[in-house]
Image: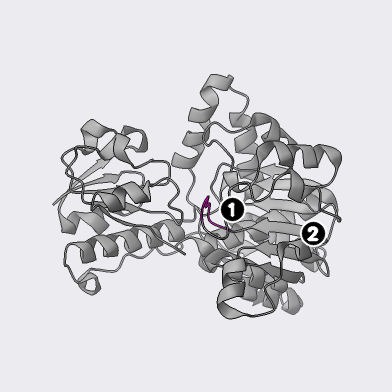
């Protein structure tokens, strides 16, 4: 079996080398001539897969190391007998930690504490359910909106979208869909923004086209939305520079880019490819992130409020302020170069480890904040 895989995927050689003849290429090099003789492709979300790439090729399997599949022409793949797989849930922890970092950094910039306020979570799947739990740990009251789950379960905890219009924070965690009973394309449009009654902080780390760009920009200009934290954008990698400049925090679609999340995605796709070839995936060797070899996060004596301590710990592990600066710097190049600069931010993203890889050293009297950090996933060590 000839496998062509994206060389930017961690542990790709260990994962796919045992399954066949492996070729690693760069994300931008997935073209008809480079994949024509492949039996299987392993891609990232930047690579669009459909007839323009695969028509006339030998490819019979496409695996994407991502949660979303909107870059795959699934009907075309199905109609041509090409199996495909994604990695649902692989980076749900990473995205959750990004949202925690975003809330804390946005709170600092806006001069707000979120404890006791209300957050509306739109989409309560692998990511949204974890975000809901993290928000509760931070002291927020959570409202959940997920029409498919509401129908499936009948659980009254899932409320209509209109019930979220008075929330202090809105965060989106839905797939991008254009068909079916619950399409999400431009779910947040001018009409929906007009219903907002509380000037919320607005976060989107799902897909850019879930939000109508012009409508969000207008909502920010009018004050219906007090501020936006955006990790995803319509038209990526050619993002709207005006919206990026209006955002309180903007990042380059990196919320799910923890090392652990990337490795989980690779493992899920590897196992799917193995099953496709009739190989017992249980017999394949495990792939684990390397041991943490960095020093603990030391919170000094007199570090201030519990919220300030939590922010210090979280920003040390997930430096969203750095990601914001890097995106803004990428917008300083000529417009024609911005898509490439955006793509480079993703491809060359630093190694980011999830909270569980970090130990936070706290003064012994900070027991309560230590409990909060442990509930968020950190290891905690107290010192006298």
Please give the label number shown on residue 184: 1
| Residue at image mark 2 | 165
Residue that appears at 28% across and 51% down: 79
Residue that appears at 46% across and 63% down: 292
Decide: few, some or many residues near mark 1? Use Cα within 10 Å; few <14, some 14-19, many ≥20. some
Cα separation, mark 2 vs mark 1, equals: 17 Å
Q: Is residue 350 magenta?
A: no
Decide: few, some or many residues near mark 2? Use Cα within 10 Å; few <14, some 14-19, many ≥20. many
Tell me if residue 258 can be seen.
yes
- Residue 217: image quadrant is top right
Main SS category, magenta section: loop
In the rendered view, tell whether residue 122 sits above or below residue 28. Answer: below
Left or right position of 29 against 35: right
Q: Position of residue 343 (x, y in %)?
A: 48, 35
Left or right position of 111 against 130: right
Q: What is the span of residues highlighted in magenta in the rendered image? A: 174-179
Q: Position of residue 192 (x, y in %)?
A: 75, 50
- Residue 264: image quadrant is bottom left
Residue that appears at 24% across and 60% down: 273
* Quarter of the C terminus within the rendering: bottom right
Please give the label number shown on residue 257: none
């Amino acid at each position: 079996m000839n496998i062509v895989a994206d060389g930017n995927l961690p542990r790709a050689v260990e994962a796919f080398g045992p399954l066949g003849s492996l070729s690693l290429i760069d994300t931008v090099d997935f073209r008809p001539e480079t994949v024509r003789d492949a039996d299987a492709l392993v891609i990232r979300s930047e690579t669009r897969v459909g007839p323009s790439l695969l028509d006339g090729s030998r490819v019979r399997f496409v695996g994407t190391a991502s949660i979303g599949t909107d870059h795959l022409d699934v009907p075309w793949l199905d109609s041509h007998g090409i199996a495909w797989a994604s990695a649902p849930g692989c980076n749900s922890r990473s995205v959750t930690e990004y949202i925690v970092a975003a809330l804390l950094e946005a709170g600092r910039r806006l001069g707000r504490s979120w404890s006791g306020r209300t957050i509306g979570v739109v989409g309560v799947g692998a990511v949204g359910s974890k975000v809901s739990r993290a928000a509760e740990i931070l002291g927020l009251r959570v409202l959940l909106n997920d029409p498919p789950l509401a129908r499936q379960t009948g659980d009254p905890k899932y409320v209509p979208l209109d019930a979220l219009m008075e929330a202090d924070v809105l965060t989106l965690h839905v797939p991008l869909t254009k068909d079916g009973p619950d399409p999400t394309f431009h779910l947040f449009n001018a009409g929906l923004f007009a219903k907002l009654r509380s000037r919320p902080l607005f976060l989107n780390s799902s897909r850019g086209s879930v939000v109508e760009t012009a409508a969000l920009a207008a909502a920010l200009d009018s004050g219906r939305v007090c501020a936006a934290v955006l990790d995803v954008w319509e038209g990526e990698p050619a993002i709207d520079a005006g919206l990026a400049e209006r955002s309180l925090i903007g990042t380059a679609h990196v919320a799910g880019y923890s090392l652990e999340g990337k490795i989980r995605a690779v493992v899920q796709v590897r196992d799917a490819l193995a099953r496709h070839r009739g190989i017992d995936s249980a017999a394949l060797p495990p792939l684990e992130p390397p041991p943490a070899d960095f020093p603990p996060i030391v919170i000094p004596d007199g570090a201030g409020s519990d919220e300030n301590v939590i922010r210090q710990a979280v920003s040390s592990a997930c430096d969203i302020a750095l990601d914001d600066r890097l995106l803004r710097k990428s917008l300083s190049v000529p417009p024609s170069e911005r898509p490439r600069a955006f793509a480079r931010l993703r491809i060359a993203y630093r190694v980011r480890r999830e909270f569980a890889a970090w130990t936070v050293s706290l003064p012994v009297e900070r027991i309560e904040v230590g409990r909060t950090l442990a509930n968020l996933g950190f290891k905690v060590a107290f010192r006298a």
